Amino acid sequence: MAYPSGFKYTRDHEWIEIDGDRGKVGITDYAQRQLGDVVYLELPEVGTTLAQGQSFGTVESVKAVSDIFAPVSGEVVAVNEAVKARPEVINKDPHGSWLVMLKLSDPDQAAGLLDAEQYARLVK
Amino acid sequence: MVAFSGWEMPLEYSGIADEHLAVRTRAGLFDVSHMGELEIAGKDALAAVQHVTSNDASRLVVGQAQYSALLTDRGTFVDDVMVYRLAPQHFLIVTNAANTSKAYAWIADRIGAYGDTVVVDTSSRYALLALQGPCSAAALQPLTRVDLDALPAFAFATGEVAGVRATISRTGYTGEDGFEIFTPPQSADRVWQAILAADPAMGVVPAGLGARDTLRLEAALRLYGHEIDETITPLEAGLERIVGWGKKGFIGLAALRAQKAQGVARRLIGFELTDPGVARRGHAVFREGSATGTVTSGTVTPFLKRAIGMAYVGAADAAPGTELEIEIRGRRPRARVVPLPFYRRATPRRP
């Protein structure tokens, strides 16, 4: 699966799609393949403030549980309840299944993230 | 691939959920050659097996197998095993991979009193394939002249599969109908390929260690290192059915009698989370805020699609319907004790 060129990526296998001062965050195709069948998500409440690199929830698959980390600092302004209700969609469409939307407190942080080409090399 | 007890094991092929569902609805093929094989033979082999295993091996006729255990003097598990009666005085004991050398040494040290009887570790002579699921018999029958219809649960027969010498046993570790096939290692690949090449309508898929674990959890089959170990007795593990109370004696019997008279302090239970979350091995279990035990296995299983698990709790907290809480990363979602197994196949085997 190709990594969307408009996204930024972390070494912990999250992606963020930034639009102005908002960013939707999800986990990458590589991450979902490593985890296998996703069965449960633990996500923060709207209004939670996250620092870059902070664990903000967990993705549970049949075989393992994995933390998810904030790619950048910001406040949670939306949680994707549809994905929370049907977490298995993450396996089918990892780059279309955002988990939380952040209001970025320091948009400059995004420049330090990986682009699609760098991320694809990382997980090759 | 994952490292498992000195073996490189496939964790999954097409995915745990996919393989799990195939076994529940069609059939899956597992390579479980990591399991150990010990053979006890000699003129007093039955007496030796009766001494070192908990279940009553005298009830086996040649061609039958039973679930049993090797126990310490304290009545706790050295290993849980399958005992096959190959001949009147010749038994095959299938052990867990991680326990094979321990079980071998343990038996060898304890059968000296039985005259001409010996124990031999024959693990390297066997590959073991497990074909499990409702389509297993239909998929296997075209490959063998052994009449599978004549093979009830826990029976086995020797013959050929795909032209390879094999012992076919109607046993397994998934809660489904199925077969375990012992073959010489050098021919195992041929048997594996022949079964996977079965009529596509049977839908046989290769299945790995991951699905084996979720399947056995739904069927509430105990796993050594999780539900049972050298601190747990069969009475605590809900396995009184493998205790041969009527036998003259076996290692661990005195301790089990004492525990039975006194009553167990803790019991293995099944639970289902009633709040969102997934319980895993090691999570603490509470009842009304007081600690009562620990989760031994847990996940969301692919067939039932519920967050289930097994745990040891205080005997007073073990009744089905009891409300518990399980600590998961600082939260305490509620759970309810449910009867085991979680899953029982709908169609009973032929009588």
Image (cartoon, rainbow, N blue to C red):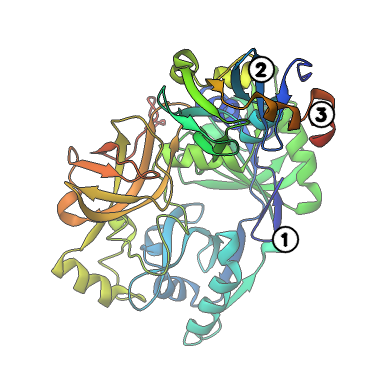
Mark 2 vs mark 1, foreground winner is 2
Give residue A17's mark.
Answer: 2
Which quarter of the rendered picture does the N terminus of chain B lie within?
A: top right
How packed mark 3 is, by other alpha carbons closer than 10 Å (few <14, some 14-19, many 20 or more), is: some
Labels 3 and 1 within one chain: no
Query: In the rendered image, which quarter is residue B70 located in?
Result: bottom left
Residue B204 appears at what percent x and percent y?
A: 65, 26
Residue occupying image coordinates x 67% and y 52%: B33
The tag earlier along the polypeptide, 2 or 3, is: 2
Residue occupying image coordinates x 67% and y 37%: A12
- Callout 3 amino acid: Ala
**Residue located beneath label 3 in the image:** A120
Is there any visible trace of residue B347 in the rendered image?
yes
Q: Describe the element under mark 2 as helix, strand or loop.
A: strand
What whole-number distance in Å separates the C-alpha atoms at marks 3 and 1? 45 Å
Labels 2 and 1 within one chain: no
Query: In the rendered image, which quarter is residue B242 located in?
Result: bottom left
Task: Name the chain under label 2.
Answer: A
How packed mark 1 is, by other alpha carbons closer than 10 Å (few <14, some 14-19, many 20 or more), is: some
Labels 2 and 3 within one chain: yes
Q: Describe the element under mark 3 as helix, strand or loop.
A: helix
- Callout 1 amino acid: Arg
Q: Describe the element under mark 1 as helix, strand or loop.
A: helix
What whole-number distance in Å separates the C-alpha atoms at marks 2 and 3? 16 Å
Q: Nearer the viewer, residue B210 or B299?
A: B299
In the rendered structure, the answer to whether residue B43 lies left or right of residue B266 reads right
Task: Name the chain under label 1.
Answer: B
**Residue located beneath label 1 in the image:** B125
Mark 2 vs mark 3, foreground winner is 2
Q: Nearer the viewer, residue A94 or B171?
A: A94
Residue B45 appears at what percent x and percent y?
A: 50, 73
Is B48 situated above or below B281? below
